[in-house]
Image (cartoon, grey):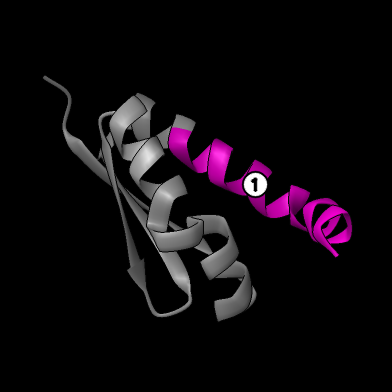
Amino acid sequence: MSEANEIVVPAPDMRVLQMILGQQDETRRLIERELPVKVGVRGESLVVTGDNAAATRAVALLKQLQQELPNLHYIAG
């Protein structure tokens, strides 16, 4: 079994952090269900814990979501 890894993903502010996590943390729960990771919040950062491969995939997904937020906000607005 791989060793647990912790990767911190900073968010620019709490609003962005809340948008990434989803309404009632639905996005966080989906990621945790699909990948063997835990996603937590520390300050204005997300903390992903899991084996190296899964944590790296989750971080890539979270960063992609963060990059897409301006487009999603425009559609919703």
**Closest to the observer, 22 or 52:** 22
**Closest to the observer, 22 or 43:** 22
Magenta segment includes 73: yes
Q: Is residue 30 above or below residue 42?
A: above
The location of residue 60, given as percent across then percent down, is 56, 37
Residue drawn at (86%, 65%) of the image:
77
Residue drawn at (46%, 69%) of the image:
45
Q: Is residue 45 above or below residue 6?
A: below
Magenta extent: 58-77
- Helix, strand or loop: magenta stretch: helix
**Closest to the observer, 23 or 50:** 23
Q: Is residue 23 left or right of residue 32?
A: right
Q: Is residue 41 left or right of residue 10?
A: left
Residue drawn at (40%, 80%) of the image:
43
Question: The residue tagged with tag 1: helix, strand or loop?
Answer: helix
Q: Amino acid at mark 1?
A: Leu
Q: Residue tagged by mark 1? A: 65
Q: Is residue 46 left or right of residue 52?
A: right
The location of residue 65, given as percent across then percent down, is 65, 46
Q: Report the quarter where the N terminus lies.
A: top left
Number of numbered discs on residues: 1
Which image quarter: residue 30? top left
Residue drawn at (26%, 42%) of the image:
5
Q: Is residue 64 left or right of residue 49?
A: right
Magenta segment includes 51: no
Which image quarter: residue 20? bottom right
